[in-house]
Image (tube, coloured by chain):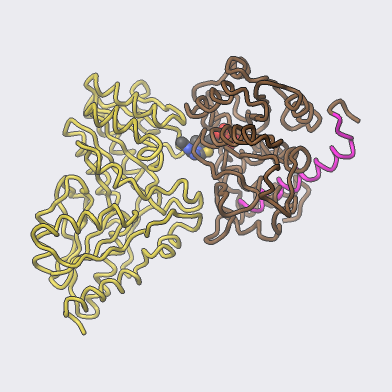
Chain colours: A yellow, B brown
Amino acid sequence: MVERKSASLAEAYSQALVELGERDPTVVALDADTSGARAGAAFEKRFPDRFWDLGMMESTLMTIASGLALGGRTVYASTIAVFAAGAAYDAVRQSVCYNRANVKIVATHGGLLVGGDGATRQMLEDIALMRSLPGMTVIVPGDAPTARTAVLDIASFDGPAYVRLTRENLPVLTDGTFTLGHAAQLREGSDLTIVAIGAMLARALDVAEELHQAGVEARVLDFASIKPADEKTLIQAARDTGAILTMEEHNVLTGLGTLVASATATTQPVPVRQVGVPDLFGESGDPWKLLDHYGLSQKHALDEAWGLLKLRGKVS
Amino acid sequence: MSESGVPPATVAELQTAARQIRQDVIRMTYHAGSGHPGGNLSVADLITALVFHELRLDPEHPDWPDRDRLVLSKGHAAPALYSALAHRGFFDPSSLLTLREIGSPLQGIVDRRKLPGVEASTGGPGQGLGMAVGIALDARLAKRPSRVYAIVGDGECESGLTWEALLAGGRYGLDNLVVFVDRNDPDPDRGTGNRMGLEPLADKLRAFRYDTLEIDGHQFPAIFEGLARARATKGRPSAIIARTVKGKGVSFMENQDAWHARPPNREEAERALAELGGRP
Ligand SMILES: Cc1ncc(C[n+]2csc(CCOP(=O)(O)OP(=O)(O)O)c2C)c(N)n1
């Protein structure tokens, strides 16, 4: 496995937010109490009168954010993913999306990697919930540089966005050249395509490296831009490689895997296999061990990759 | 007998039990490497009073229909409840150190489907209280003698759901419902989840039709007086604002926000246990 430097996505957000504040006086920010881990703390320090900490009122966070946005501001609202997309869902749906308010929701603590707090804090359905909302942009960065670029980019359009971050530091894999609506190719290959998001992106690259050692070349796509989705690149990958493996820290019924399968089915159907969380709630545990426990291990991904290659007759 | 009708010998026993719970909270959060020491230490006396004295429970038959219910709406006080349930005989205390481990029924936040004695899987602020209202309605409808005790955090009272549930409990005149507020963060400029300032909290609860009392949440006689008054109240629910100290019992954790959600390291755990009269 390659040694890589790790960095915090929440910290990248925190710094990008201050940058935005410097650039644009209409940018304001709100947090709902995230127990000392408040992403907006640096912004609050720099722009105290453009920041509000609403406490544990996640639905009200979204309604107030919307009101601020309707007045012409660019509003960044941040809280823990399970509350941003779950507890506050109806407020996001109605006050933010139906109103088409210019609210950028930055959700910290996505996925199983929350660890010890267990199921009630581990958001595994947010891609489904947020992607289903008309007008919503959805981004799941796979590293801190991408998180930074994404947070800056979404300020450039008028409309809602949801960015899912991870609590654990993640390996730095890119230089942050993220483009909305574009799937970045991190590795070339023509035997198989691996499409991955978030914490699974590093694992995808590790799987591709292992396959390379065995003489198989896998293409790796960073699918941080979930919505809008880069269907063209997916269909091209299906055509070039004939099989796709998806890797995500989300319920497999409603996440990246189903997106990829439905996007390719219409024009270039190929076998798609998913590595992700089965239709289960999470539980308490060491964050990285939980990933393995729920079938998101590198080994399991590798088994699925070999399964696909056999299916396509590329190995015997 | 004290005024509360609880003999001094019992009070002494309960103090010992509460000390045991506080020691367990330290050991468990240290061992798990995560958790919420501050808000567990603040409710240790309330949980002790309820689990060891007030509640009619049968550890041999945890689903006995007529039992009283404790709904821990501030579900992150799980370690304190687990310790109380274990020492009350619901399960073997030797499993306490599995807190937050994969496969353990001792989830970081209470889970009723994993551990007997836990009445409701809570965690989302105000949701446990709403469930408690439902449980109390159900008991009344079924003419069961069960009484329902909910413990909510003061930060939790920022959530609109809490007030919706309180409204319902008052509207339905649930005199089998007692709501404890663990008032451990009275300062709106500090503390976790109390940015909006709740005072005058007692007036608010009275306006929501609760028979409301403020007590020292670390004094057993005061807790039992409150419980006795609640039992005697007819036609409406009771609210007991328990003034407590976050981190109570460990000098360097008391009233320190930093200990809301940070576990002690080895040296801190040893110091805390020494203060609590326990062995590491
Ligand atoms: C909807 C929601 N927002 C944020 C959190 C994160 N959180 C966990 S405990 C807590 C503080 C709760 O304060 P309080 O109810 O007073 O508990 P205590 O201070 O007694 O531990 C917060 C903000 C949460 N659990 N749920």
B226 relative to B275, above or below: above
For residue B87, side relative to residue B180 (left or right): right
Magenta segment's dominant SS is: helix
- Position of residue B129 relative to residue A313, above or below, is above
Residue B139: percent from left, percent from top: 64, 36
In the image, residue A111 lies in the stretch drawn in magenta: no
Q: Residue B42's image quarter?
A: top right
Over which residues does the magenta segment extend? B5-29
Q: Is residue A211 left or right of residue A182?
A: right
Instruction: Looking at the picture, tell me which residue is in the foreground, A183 or A39.
Output: A183
Query: Residue at point 78% right, 30% down?
Result: B224
Query: In this view of the protein, which residue sits in the foreground, B278 or A136?
Result: A136
In x, y percent, where is residue A211?
Answer: 24, 75
Residue at 24% across / 80% down in the picture? A214
State the image quarter where residue A270 is shown. Answer: bottom left
In the image, B106 versus A219, the foreground residue is: B106
Q: x, y (%) of residue A23? A: 22, 29
Image quarter hosting the C terminus of chain A? bottom left
Q: Is residue A170 left or right of residue A228?
A: right
The quadrant of the image that shows the N terminus of chain A is: bottom left
Q: Residue at x 35, y 52 (%)?
A: A7
Figure check: A48 above or below B150: above
**Which residue is located at x 52 percent, y 61 percent?**
B102
Where does residue B120 sit, x and y in percent of width and height?
57, 43
On the rendered structure, is A30 left or right of A245? right
* Quadrant in the picture for residue A51: top left
Q: Is residue A35 visible?
A: no
